[in-house]
Image (spheres, rainbow, N blue to C red):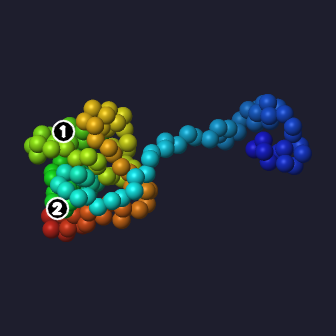
Amino acid sequence: MHALLKQEGLVVNRKRTYRLYREEGLQVRTKQRKKLKRPRMPIELPQKVNQRWSMDFVSDQLADGRRFRVLNVVDDFYRECVGQLVASSIPGAMVGRFLSQLIEAREAKPRSIICDNGPEFTCKAMFFWLKEQRVKLGFIQPGKPTQNAFVESFNGKFRAAVLN
């Protein structure tokens, strides 16, 4: 607002603009929100098993209306489903525990895990889990599910064969 008023030559002092803004009871934010910057990793094809996993959610609802979610984890080399977690709510801490169980069961951990920018994958619990396990987490670009094609393909087949 100050930039617009200054451009028209009506105001020079930023503090005066803010005082008038407060007196009028306006609700426009004066500061821009800080956006979390996540590094984008180039997508490469894995060369061996457990090099890269992909994960994503599928949701559906039961006949009585209760919703549930399924977390699918796919090994990108063999394109096999490493594991599935089904629950009505899956927070980031539960995702970390489930991935730990998968690593323990397979006796090998992936170098990297590719996922979308969902809140379950960008939370503090996942950050600390990744740091502890020394696994890299790669994010696809928002609105581009084709960058996570292996798990998206699995989700489509899973929906058609099981959920539908």
Question: Does the residue at mark 2 contact the one at mark 1 (Cβ under 8 Å)?
Answer: no
Residue 141 horizontal/vertical position (percent):
43, 56
- Provide the residue designation for mark 2: 78
Assign the C terminus to one quadrant of the image. bottom left
Mark 1: amino acid = Ser
- Provide the residue designation for mark 1: 100
Q: Nearer the viewer, residue 65 or 143?
A: 143
**Residue 150 seen in the figure:** yes
Question: Quick check: 164 above or below 87?
Answer: below
Question: Quick check: 11 above or below 156?
Answer: above
Mark closest to the chain's N terminus, 2 or 1: 2
Residue 11 horizontal/vertical position (percent):
87, 39
In whole angstroms, how far apart are the C-alphas of marks 2 and 1?
Answer: 20 Å
Quarter of image, res 91:
top left
Residue at position x 31%, y 34% in the image: 131
Residue at position x 38%, y 42% in the image: 122
Residue at position x 14%, y 64% in the image: 162
Residue at position x 79%, y 30% in the image: 15
Q: Could you classify mark 1 by the number of other residues whose Cα lies within 10 Å: few (under 14), some (14-19), or many (20 or more)?
A: some
